[in-house]
Image: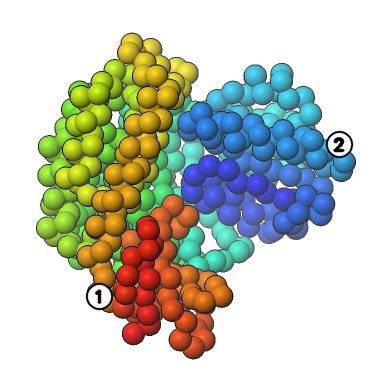
Amino acid sequence: MKIGIKVLGCPKNEADCDVLEAILRSRGHEIVYSVDAADTIVIDTCCFIEEAKRESIDEILDFIEYKKKKSFFLCVKGCLVQRYAPQLVEELPEVDAWYGVLSPQRLAEALEKRVRFLVEQPETVYECAPRSRFNSYAYVKIADGCDRNCTFCAIPVFKGRFRSRSIESIEAEVRELVRNGVKELVLVAQDTTAYGIDLYGKPSLPKLLRVLDSVEGEFRLRIMYMHPDHFDEEILSCFCNARKVLHYFDLPVQHGSDEVLARMGRVKKSDQLLEMIFSIRKALPDAAIRSSVIVGFPGEKEKNFEELLEFLKVAKFERLGCFVYSDEEGTPASELQGKVDEEIAKERMEEVLSLQAELARESLSRFVGEKLQVLVEKEAKNHYIARSHLDAPEVDGIVKVRKNGKLNLPSFQLVRILDTDGFDLRGVLV
């Protein structure tokens, strides 16, 4: 087969499809990067929020339209199918195959057999994670599923219980990636701080990080999706003592009002969240903290929103994502009273983003004049494009490094920061 793969949604999907690509290549299939060259198209979908669902449906419809011009086997897989398979099959008969949340190995086998429908309850997580394409960074999925009970989130419904990969399999994948020149390994899961609780009887992220930190080679580790309720002193101590773990903390707090946090099913209150943030900044003054918040949650009054704004002013996150709440079928939040008008919710989001732009500018300015190690990844016309510890791939800013000779890419370089540029930094090679 000549297979084209379209990935939508989160980095966890990207990690899965990288592994799928390698498995398909190992079985003699060709991966192609244009529809014209493909006889099979795989779309990996997302349904985390309403916007993600719309994007997935729009992408499917685009490929259905293209099928009128060129014949190919169209397979749609992933979270959207896992959750809405009966409706999708009925409404989109032009799609040739529907697969739910499957391991890459199982998906490859189903594709080869041209299985038309395969949706099962997710119960396992893959241990073998081969790769065939290597970039400057790679996502490494350390677990799948979720056992949390956030009232707004449907992920446990379609992703299943929390399931960790073994430390040995993750270490083997990291060694293979580093051997092939990957410079940044981004660890992902629905909740990375819960890693190992199912395998080892307790959360074991620090144990995993100590093992990965001992791997030989020139690379760095970035940890994403850490749940604030599981973040503790042992994890912080590991960040302080590890040589290769970036001082980057992705901690989605979701809100800053205790009333709203309680309705969301979150455990830590706003003062505990701030205490966590202060402890990180005290231990690691160069720390970059990324978070996300939801506005327009059912029952969010103006008073609650003002509490969120005040919380953000104190927390001073370097990076922040903001989402407008949308009902997810089957979640407790969808049954709550006090729905917030959509226009009001959008206005609140704009206000949060405007405030964050000011806070980020202030926070980033403390790095002006400092020297930062950056990963230089691309060459633009007048500068190199790099990322510091502040910058996760695809979601954060960049460092624009003034050209001064030719560099091998990708490579780590020491840069003196000259100025801020919105959410980015500008610098020069030291």
Q: Residue at x 36, y 16 (%)?
A: 339
Kindly identify the amino acid type of the residue bearing the numbered disc 2: Lys
Relative placement, left or right, of 116 versus 71 is: left
Q: Is residue 298 visible?
A: yes
| Of labels 1 and 2, the one closer to you | 1
Q: Looking at the image, is 137 positioned above or below residue 14?
A: below
| Mark drawn on residue 369 | 1
Amino acid at pointer 1 = Gly
Q: Is mark 1 on a helix, strand or loop?
A: loop
Element type at marker 2? Answer: loop
Mark 2 sits on what residue?
68
In the image, residue 51 sits, relative to residue 289, either above or below, namely above
Distance Cα–Cα, label 1 vs label 2? 57 Å
Residue at the (66%, 41%) spot, across then down: 43
Horizontal side, residue 88 vs residue 9: left or right: right
The part of the image, by quadrant, that contains residue 255 is: top left
Q: Is residue 163 visible?
A: no
